Image (tube, helix red, strand yellow):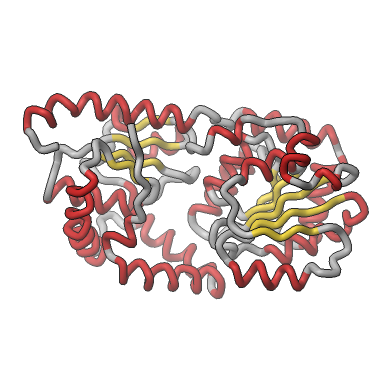
Amino acid sequence: MDARIVDAYEHAVALFSRVAGAGYIRMVKTVPSLYGFLYDRVERAKEPGSLRKWLGTLSARNLHRLIAELDPSCVICTHAFPCGIMAQYKRTIDPSLPVVGVVTDYVVHPVWIYPNVDAYAVATDEMRSALISRGVEPGRVWVTGIPVDPRFALVPPKSQARRELGVGSLEDRQLVLVMAGGLGIGPLETMLRGLVPLRDGIAAVVLTGKNARRRARLERWCAQWPFPVSIHGFEDNVYDYMHAADLLLTKPGGLSVSEALVARLPMVLVRPLGGQEQRNTRYLLERRAALYASTEEEIARAARRLLERPGARRRILVRAEALRRPEAAADVAEIVRDLVEREAPAVSAAGSR
């Protein structure tokens, strides 16, 4: 079965995509609390707003040509926005096209929920219960974990991982991976300053995502840093960096923390945004599978605890192991395969695809 990755924003409502994307970045940079407020307010809403309904209808029409061209056997949505578009598409254009929603956080927001989405893959039993409580049929909700690249689970010896990554010269230091998501908008400078008290025994690799301006600024800022720091942009092989590292400092996006769990890399979660990142943080902290820090002093304490106290490190890894779902991607693929095979006879009889 072949797969095609499509940016639903680009194909459905390109202008809205540019405006919304720029607005989102500006909001989380300048007033992150506003994003949390809006997330909470929409979460409490009983019905979709009129703008959301209008965008769903318009987007479904705009996607019609693309779907006709690709002729998919199934559409998998990893974001709530395309999930809503495809629900509207099934209502107004083709109810036979299977749609699967894959929720990539440790909380499910109501904007994901539509009565005609054929299946949901979620991270936890609590999320499954939340969907069922809002009217989704139990047979349509599967607890798979959050799917990540299977290579995160192939954990080699750290010495080998560092040699393959080209940082073998740092063998005498512990390596801290510092991340801020694909947009590179997390508190990277705060994270690096928080590590200064550990400077004699550590090195750091920073991934700035697709934020080229942030990367250039950090390269200048770290030119004379008191411990070795390597700055990189967006990388496809994040699993190699996680395998080489001893500790991860990150903003708690659902995919990033799931990748770290699968890679068996202990985490310090730093300054989550409101909304889903706060919920992700709460989920991990309640299970004592990660540490949290917001100030430079807290970052230093948490990093020391996980780098210098083997017992503390071992305990947090044991608790994180209970949340580790390396087979999530394969489990979601199995759900999709079963759904496609179940729908195939009806589709053939109808002659629509």
- Please state, as top left, top right, bottom left or bottom right, where the C terminus lies in the image: top left
Quarter of the image where one finds residue 143 = top left
Q: Is residue 47 visible?
A: yes
Quarter of the image where one finds residue 216 = bottom right
- Expressed as whole percent of the image width and height from the top left, the position of residue 57 reads 18, 59
- Number of marks in the rendered image: 0
Q: Is residue 251 above or below residue 72?
A: below
Q: Is residue 129 above or below residue 34?
A: above
As rendered, which of 279 and 101 lies closer to the eye? Answer: 101
- Please state, as top left, top right, bottom left or bottom right, where the N terminus lies in the image: top left
- Expressed as whole percent of the image width and height from the top left, the position of residue 295 reads 74, 62
Farthest right residue? 200
**Which residue is pictured at 45% across the width and 68% down the height?**
24
**Which residue is pictured at 17% across the width and 45% down the height?**
90
**Which residue is pictured at 75% across the width and 58% down the height?**
230
Residue 340 shown left or right of residue 151 in the figure: left
- Expressed as whole percent of the image width and height from the top left, the position of residue 256 reads 58, 47
Q: Is residue 135 visible?
A: no
As rendered, which of 292 and 200 lies closer to the eye? Answer: 200
Farthest left residue? 350
As rendered, which of 261 and 160 lies closer to the eye? Answer: 160
- Expressed as whole percent of the image width and height from the top left, the position of residue 308 reads 87, 42
